[in-house]
């Protein structure tokens, strides 16, 4: 059993609870409206990613190709005859006759971008100075000073490998002679050393002269301008009985035909 004081307290508590439950709940205040940013968004400025010339060095009048890539531009122009209305990415052939710098201007809502590229036109080297002309020589002088004797091994009539450069020089000089004077005739004289009979050496000298003529004709010397003759051992250059002297006499000599 509750005593009177406790009963009174309990009733008061119940009355307060019922009174509180009957009150209307107040809703929370609404959130504030979002703040509106009226600042305009930035506009991108044109960007020229590259503007190049390939090749960058040419000869006068030869082509070079301008290449470019541009973003955020509404107008693209290049001076020196290339023009405007260009696409954002492209190429254009140019044919400069002198070193030229091409200037690109890219314009858009965000501003302007510029770039340069240069095509260098190389200058050809100056012509080599013409050497002083050598004094003119007669065909007889060329024959005497530029056409050299060919020499042969003992008892042989073949042109030696070590004489091939001499043979080629003789062929060049003889062709010059015949160009200067188409009527000029050269005689190839076959000679031998003193060893052996006169008859044998006449035959050997003839073979040496013939082999020399054949080798020259193979190098382009006209054969109808060449005559051959054998002197055997009758026209020695040296009369000593030594090997060095014999070697000088084993030769094919060139002379103007009389």
Image: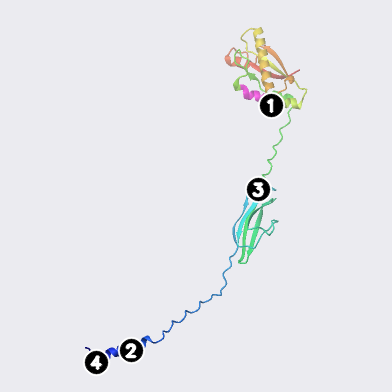
Depth order, front residue of 53/210: 53
Depth order, front residue of 239/225: 225
| Viewer can see residue 174 | yes
Side of 165 relative to 133 (left or right): left
Which badge, 3 or 4, comes first in the chain's sequence? Answer: 4
Which badge, 3 or 1, comes first in the chain's sequence? Answer: 3
Q: CA distance from mark 4 to mark 2?
A: 17 Å
Helix, strand or loop: magenta stretch: helix
Q: Residues within 10 Å of mark 4 (few under 14, many from 20)?
A: few
Image quarter (top left, top right, bottom left or bottom right) of the C terminus: top right
> Compared with residue 66, is residue 203 higher up or lower down, i.e. above or below?
above
- Marks 3 and 2: in contact by CB < 8 Å? no
Residue 255, percent across and down? 71, 19
Which dot, 2 or 1, sits closer to the camera?
A: 2
Which dot, 3 or 4, sits closer to the camera?
A: 4
Would you name the residue on which mark 3 appears? 58
Q: Residues within 10 Å of mark 2 (few under 14, many from 20)?
A: few
Residue 62, percent across and down? 68, 47
Would you name the residue on which mark 2 appears? 16
Q: Residues within 10 Å of mark 1 (few under 14, many from 20)?
A: some
Q: Which residues are magenta?
A: 163-171
Would you name the residue on which mark 4 appears? 5
Which quarter of the picture shows residue 247?
top right
As helix, strand or loop, the secondary structure at mark 1 comes to helix
């Amino acid at each position: 059993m509750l005593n009177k004081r406790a009963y009174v307290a309990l009733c008061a508590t119940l009355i307060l609870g019922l009174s509180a439950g009957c009150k209307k709940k107040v809703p929370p205040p609404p959130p504030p409206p979002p703040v509106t940013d009226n600042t305009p968004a930035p506009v991108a400025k044109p960007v020229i990613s590259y503007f190049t010339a390939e090749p960058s060095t040419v000869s006068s009048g030869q082509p070079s190709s301008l290449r470019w890539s541009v973003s955020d531009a509404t107008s693209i122009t290049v001076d020196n005859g290339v023009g405007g209305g260009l696409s954002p990415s492209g190429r254009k052939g140019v044919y400069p006759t002198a070193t030229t710098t091409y200037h690109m201007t890219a314009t858009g809502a965000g501003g302007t971008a510029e770039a340069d590229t240069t095509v260098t036109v190389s200058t050809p080297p100056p012509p080599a100075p013409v050497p002083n002309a050598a004094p003119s020589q007669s065909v007889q002088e060329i024959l005497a000073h530029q056409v050299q004797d060919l020499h042969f091994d003992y008892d042989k009539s073949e042109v030696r490998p070590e004489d091939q450069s001499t043979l080629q020089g003789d062929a060049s000089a003889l062709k010059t002679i015949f160009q200067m004077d188409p009527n000029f005739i050269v005689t190839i004289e076959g000679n031998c050393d003193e060893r052996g009979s006169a008859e044998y050496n006449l035959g050997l000298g003839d073979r040496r002269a013939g082999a020399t003529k054949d080798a020259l004709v193979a190098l382009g010397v006209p054969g109808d301008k060449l005559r051959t003759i054998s002197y055997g051992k009758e026209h020695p250059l040296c009369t000593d009985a030594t090997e060095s002297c014999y070697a000088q006499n084993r030769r094919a000599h060139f002379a103007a035909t009389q």
